Amino acid sequence: MGSVLSSLMQIGELSERAGVTHRTIHYYERLGLVRPAEREGSGYRYYDESALKRLEKIAALKRLGLSLDDIAAVIDLYFADATGIKGKEKVLEILQAQLSRTETQLQELTAFKHDLTANIARMHALIADAKRK
Amino acid sequence: MGSVLSSLMQIGELSERAGVTHRTIHYYERLGLVRPAEREGSGYRYYDESALKRLEKIAALKRLGLSLDDIAAVIDLYFADATGIKGKEKVLEILQAQLSRTETQLQELTAFKHDLTANIARMHALIADAKRK
DNA sequence: CGACAATCTACACCCAACGTCAGGTTTACG
DNA sequence: CGTAAACCTGACGTTGGGTGTAGATTGTCG
């Protein structure tokens, strides 16, 4: 319609490109994680490219084990002008807590990777052994 | 009572030492993640030290983002005689799939850590700036 | 032996993160 | 202008990972 909307996409396209369902997007909107760039009159949601970026970032943070609530607390750091963020000390606290969790997780994950490779080698040996009997 | 049980602990002690509730232990037992060393007559569960080790391992694997089902599939690698594990190919598949997920996760986690440190630095600068106004 | 703590089973309930379904509106197309 | 596709909201269902509670049983201690 209007030229403003011409560069925007509807929820169907967004959900497909982001690899989530439209219900998930609705759900994220209720949690304050994403919102449409435009939404007048009809009620249809129209999104710009930044919404896609947000959804991708959310997926990445989820893979790291953050809850949606945790994500809500930090996502604006990636997309808003940080100079305008209120409660900077609070945000700083959250970030630092997250950093220390992340470092622990990195160590555990590295150790786990070693375990896995060792176990894989062991399994290979056992299988070869069993077949050679 | 019997000398066999003298070195064992009940669910209360186990749960306290493992930092989980007895309800969680019951739940894990239903999923096949832990089981008591002894359980005759009375119905009381008696555990040895290896049960504690298992619970700690479970917690560690959970922190890495494995589901309880995933954990059930691999935990015996840590505590059972691997030569006796049936379906070795299947276990191998699980391990390799997990390894590739783990490697991805390691990369994402490293990137996330960089993001966090960058954002922390930015927050520090902004706060200092705001206070110096 | 009585009292009280620890444990048992079974069922119900909780939260997060969605998915499903139903009924109603809006938009695009021939 | 009719119809189909896309969208809307609201209510309810589901899965994973547990927690709460009741009522009964077992163990311990003076």
Image (cartoon, coloured by chain):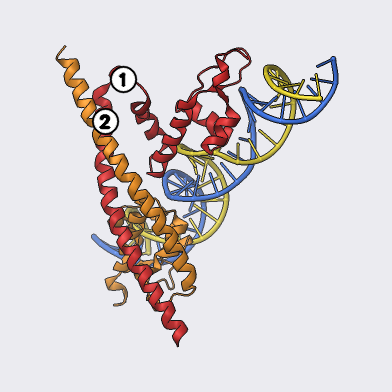
Chain colours: A red, B orange, C yellow, D blue
- The answer to whether residue B116 is left or right of residue C12 is left
- The residue indicated by pointer 2 is B119
Residue that appears at 28% across and 54% down: A108
Q: Quadrant of the N terminus of chain B?
A: bottom left
- The residue indicated by pointer 1 is A85
- Residue B113 x, y percent position in the rendering: 28, 40
- Residue B44 x, y percent position in the rendering: 40, 66
Question: A114 or A71: nearer the eye?
Answer: A114
- SS at mark 2? helix
Image: A43 above or below A51 = above
Q: Amino acid at mark 1?
A: Ile
Q: Which mark is drawn over residue A98?
A: none
Image: B21 above or below B52 = above
- Residue A72 x, y percent position in the rendering: 39, 30
Residue that appears at 39% across and 59% down: B99
Q: Please identify the quarter of the rendering in which residue B42 is found.
A: bottom left
Q: Amino acid at mark 2?
A: Asn
- The answer to whether residue D15 is left or right of residue B113 is right
